[in-house]
Amino acid sequence: MKTRDPLELDFFDDESSAALDRRDFLKLSGGGIAVLFFIGDPRRLLARSRRRLPGGRQYPDDFNAYLLVGADGKVTCLTGKIEMGQGVITSLAQELADELDVSIDSVEMVMGDTDRCPWDMGTFGSLTTRFFGPALRAAGAEARAVLIKLAAERLGVPARQLVTERGKVMLKSDKKRAVSYASLARGKKITKRVKSKTLLKKAAEFKIIGRPVSRRDAHEKVTGQAKFAADMRLPGMLYARILRPTAHGSERTRLDTSGAGKIPGLRVIEDGDLVAVLHQDPGQADAGLDRIKADFDVPEATVDEKSIYDHLLKSAPAGQLAAHGGNLARGAKRSKTVIERTYLNAYVAHAPIETHSALAKVDGQKATIWASSQTPFRLKDEVAKALAIPEANVHVISPFVGGGFGGKSFNQQAVEAARLSHLTGKPVQVAWSRAEEFFYDTFRPAALVKIKAGLGADKKLVLWDYGVYFAGQRGSEQFYDIPNHRTRVFGNGWRGDKDVHPFATGAWRAPANNTNTFARESHIDALARAAGIDPLDFRLKSLRDKKMLGVLKAAADKFGWKKYDGQAGRGRGIALGIDSGTYVATIVEVEVDPRSGHVQVKRVVCAQDMGLCINPQGAKLQIEGCVTMGLGYALSEQVRFSGGEILDRNFDSYEIPKFSWLPEIETIVIDARDKPPQGGGEPAIITVGGAVANAVFDAVGRQVLELPMTPERVLAALGEDPAH
Amino acid sequence: MSGSIRFQLNGQAKSLAIDRERTLLWVLRVDLGLTGTKCGCGEGLCGACTVLVDDKAVRSCQLTAGDVDGKRVVTIEGLARDGQLHPVQQAFVEHDALQCGFCTPGMIMNACGLLKRNPHPSRAEIIAAMDDNLCRCGAHIRIVQAVQSAARALAGGGR
């Protein structure tokens, strides 16, 4: 798969403003200078949205974000992207401030508001920094050029004699002769579009990009002032609790709501599939729900978390070839040692601490929705469709989102809130309980990876035959130097395989790549061990990719691989991977208790080459977050189920990483400031499962082929080894 | 089932005419508009709803309004004074000890409770005390550092 170069931005070189969405600009009070931009080729975007919306309805597609230099000198960036902890509220402001030569404090980010911000596809896939960032910088540079031109007229000097600094344009030779951006923007109503020739600053010119900046939203978040969807309050609002089926695929056969009616102030709504109780106190709504009696006809469970893998193999469609080279038969012939294994990983939940929440206020044909959503514009469509009202009448605001990880891309809770608000005539909050969050989560799909690989007489890799079932393609292509190889992908994975899984599946932080990297890197260690070669040396001699070698060597140096003196019960493991254009090498040390099978990760070193790193502090936070979260899918997280019934309903049985799990985490971000920026929120997590698995392998001498590596599975692996 | 409670909330005397059996979390979030205290699991398993009652960190989703009658309750909104952040809040900011920020109020209140009963906790004691507060973004190591530096700041003459 070829990664698109994010700096090759395809801008319309068009000064006309005829196609602008006027509505947005009429709202800009006080005038100023607006620069419109978009990510990707708008013609392609337009074609895509036309395909998606056969009704002929179109988005204002010639731009999908803009910035405004206001008459007060403040710079505002309006974008449909949202902040869910990944830190773009800080890094995007850095990029804009640097290109525009203003202080970061004078940049305001307006995010995820569908009335104020132009259409955006959503916040996922580590796209914001890779694709949005460069476009935003170009818009900043364009705004700066406009300001210089205006200043040249004002000061009566040629533009080339002017420079910009801290929100002012000034003469290069006499910096006292200066005009502020505020005074230049005052009274103006200028709209510009970014030109393809816009020159971005070079790395050597950066003043704010590349410097560590702390979170800009920290103050709001430590004082409790930061508003999440469930924190929104409107007069007369009601809190809803909704009757849920006991299992996916079940049908309701009996309903008796009479008991609920006895609670004063409680409203019961029954509208087709939607049965809800509403009260001005959420506690009373809970009590009302408890009094509703319903029976469900639940289809007999045919799969659970143990039998799912057989089911998946039986359900597998034909494989799609993702990569190939050389000749597999020749590779097999040259192989002196062949290792064949199947790797498994369980369904895992997103489990953000904020459950899906929304407040809806529906007034006749108009709806306003505050929702925890990674996709506010999709939500707008979903609500318009559910209420049969024009899409333009739906205003969605996605305030701070309390963790998403891919799990807040569909907006069922907002549609439910909108329907209930419509039916009751009151503002309605729907905030899912933890059990509902587990039930309706779009889990990372359970998946298998089958690998057959061979080493030649010289102990070099000569064969790689790889098939991934139901995880998806991302991260499946291997990057080692193997002359004869094939990678096949069975099923769409996180993009959806109809009628295969007993419940919904979807994108989970770095979708597919956690599974693929775990399997590939586990297999590389199995091969290294068979060859009797140290796993670091084996990788070093099997790699040609300079970037990968760079991160591997950086991590190994920091870890002290060559000087490592392992104690009994301890082991170390490496995993490499590529995600969202970023290269990652992770090395961990674990301690395994041979009696209990418990694995404690002691130390993690993670080196990452992400091209230009906008905010090294933010990148560090994301790496640490990835490593910590990754320990969950490596060691404990698996959704237990019986057919369509989800048995994990809260954090007592579904264990996510805790303080007591904490390893030491050391991070390295390779200095690659002259290269385009790549993803930061997802890449590091892909290596955690593989690195921990390889460290367990090193510690106990046996491979655990299934994630999570629960104590039972570690003990089982130990039991297979006569040496233990 | 009507009744009333009198308690001290964030330093102010408060009396409420409410059903004493109602869940404290909803009284705070709904009746009093103190939405900084979050609901993450509803069963006392995640700690997002942690508040201080008589200086002890407790889970407000597991308490009733009657439970705090005659007691002192502090929520995340009551920590900063005159615009000055509490040393624990300040340490969270300085250490970037948060990402999405949803678990943050509960983390801070739990840390305050710890420091009230043990002003000089070791790293191991911090980890043990914080262990049942869940964070999905993975800010844990920074939270531990923040609590350590808050302890130092408080020992140096803070609150």
Image (spheres, grey):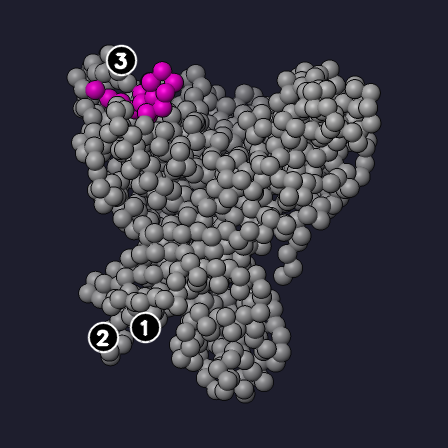
Which residue does the image show at 54% across and 70% down from the upper left?
A543
Residue beneath disc 1: A702
Residue A541's tag is none
Which residue is labeled 3 in the image? B12
* Residue span colored magenta: B72-86
Residue type at the position of mark 2? His
Task: Place residue B119 in its image quadrant.
Answer: top left
Secondary structure category for the residue under label 3? strand
x and y, in percent, of residue A266 in the image: 34, 23
Above or below — where is B36 with respect to A128? above
Residue holding disc 2: A724
Element under label 1?
Answer: loop
Left or right of residue A202, residue A475 in this image: left
Q: Chain of mark 2?
A: A
Of residues A439 and A107, the one nearer the viewer is A107
Q: Residue at x 34, y 52 (%)?
A: A664
Q: Amino acid at mark 1?
A: Arg
- How far is disc 1 from disc 3 in space, using C-alphas? 61 Å
Structural crowding at the residue carrying mark 1, measured as other residues with C-alpha within 10 Å and reported as few (<14), some (14–19) or many (≥20): some
Q: Is residue A492 above or below residue A72?
A: below
